[in-house]
Image (tube, coloured by chain):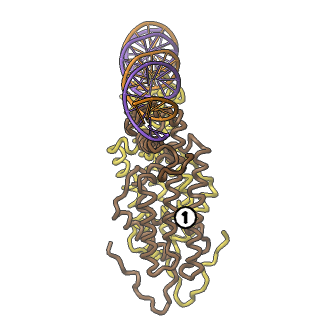
Chain colours: A brown, B yellow, C orange, D purple
Amino acid sequence: MRPGVSPDTFPPRGHEAKRLSIVDAAAGVFCREGFAGANIDLIAIEAGVSRQTVYNHHGDKEKLFIAVVRDLTERCNAGIFATIATFPDQPGDLEADLVGFAVRLNQNCICNRDGKFLRKLIQTEGERYPELFAEWREQGPGRTWPAIAARFARLAYGGHLTIDDPDVAARQFLGLVNAELQTTFMLGGTPREDEVVQSATNGVRTFLRAFGKRPSPAGAKKHTALANA
Amino acid sequence: MRPGVSPDTFPPRGHEAKRLSIVDAAAGVFCREGFAGANIDLIAIEAGVSRQTVYNHHGDKEKLFIAVVRDLTERCNAGIFATIATFPDQPGDLEADLVGFAVRLNQNCICNRDGKFLRKLIQTEGERYPELFAEWREQGPGRTWPAIAARFARLAYGGHLTIDDPDVAARQFLGLVNAELQTTFMLGGTPREDEVVQSATNGVRTFLRAFGKRPSPAGAKKHTALANA
DNA sequence: GACGATTTAGACAAGGCTGTCTAAATTTGT
DNA sequence: ACAAATTTAGACAGCCTTGTCTAAATCGTC
């Protein structure tokens, strides 16, 4: 820490690496087995670490669990904001661009390992740690949803959409785009990529039917007849 | 069982009553604590029954859990089909009628005790009992969603809606109508009635913007300017 | 090569839970 | 009121888990 010669890791390398691998393994075990069913021995084994090391790093089971949730929230948020940065502000093909955005959001943030784990932990243990998950609610949906809403507001301002309430529209966008993945999510599964694309495509199409600029009433033809599904 | 004098309960009254109260108590405890964390002593106490009686009725913890899920699935399904029977086939005010339907569906089937419990158990333990929850998937969404889709198809056939794929429309209807309740559902909470109504109202409005009969192109004016939210 | 910090393996106590067993008490139907 | 079935309370063995402790081994750094 004194002489800044070390390449890019301040604390002892192996130390922090172990901390990471413990949190990672713990996330998996907590998800599979639930808090009560999670076994610290198993976590230690999956982390490639002795049980004592787990206790050295995190004190006890509950503190470990909290560390896991905090970690996952942080990483997922980072991913979501990175994806929001790819939102199509100046769309070429609005439908295709929104589908792409929705698919990226799902694949990189919601269906990936961290997203899946965080979702499951919230569902499973949310009621046991009210303050912890209130914190998640503020840091997660509380920050990401308005950010998405702002992007939709910008699209509306630019004349690409007709939206009353951007916050409502954002939530409905997410609801539509995931409409066909609900049962899979409930069961903790991971949808295949083509299912994600299909759901996003259908969702965006409906979204644009509701909020898209109406095609000029003159040339109103079967312009929506893309149906291949 | 021989002479059918008994009023309306075939098996010994107290016996079946106890079975019921055990399953009920078990549902609550399994939800709160997870399968691993659930304590049979506690279930017995909450059911007002001795521990041995729990074992007499259900054999062991796992069989008890399975009985709970089967029971909840059955009861929830019954509720959902009863509500589907109230779907507005001959709508007067389509928007109001669909909002009413959505609110009934939420209040009577999804947010009530059974619905909440079943949802939580599926989320929490779904991966641990693949066949059991595959069964739920077939009996639940596998039967109710097509039933709802059929109702939407009928509305479209009657000229009240413009729908390509009724199955997609049904899933999207559910997604839209619940769009604002997602975080509450995730955390296992029960939304207030006004939140349910709000979400349903916004959802139905968007649904009709997408699938409602287009107002005749002639008198196309700001007919959608109902905004009070 | 030597030093300090970290990690490891294993044993350990304390406590909790499941599922069984027994004998007594209670309920149910006749 | 009687007989059979059901329920109850309590004790019990067996197992698993958490969290602590100790002494040896390993790692990173100078």
Residue corresponding to mark 1: A171
Vertical placement of residue B131 versus A224, above or below: above
Q: Is residue C9 left or right of residue D11?
A: left
The image quarter containing residue A226 is bottom left
Between residue A219 and residue A35, name the one nearer to us: A35
x then y, percent, for residue A15: 47, 41
Query: So how many labels did they put on this image?
Result: 1
Q: Is residue B146 left or right of residue A162?
A: left
x then y, percent, for residue B15: 45, 27
- Say which quadrant the N terminus of chain B sits in: top left
Vertical placement of residue A178 versus B208, above or below: above
Q: Residue at x 58, y 67 (%)?
A: A168
Using a 10 Å C-alpha cutoff, classify the residue at mark 1 as few (fewer than 14 neighbours), some (14 to 19) or many (20 or more). many
- Disc 1 residue type (three-letter): Arg
Q: Residue at x 66, y 68 (%)?
A: B229
The image quarter containing residue A151 is bottom right
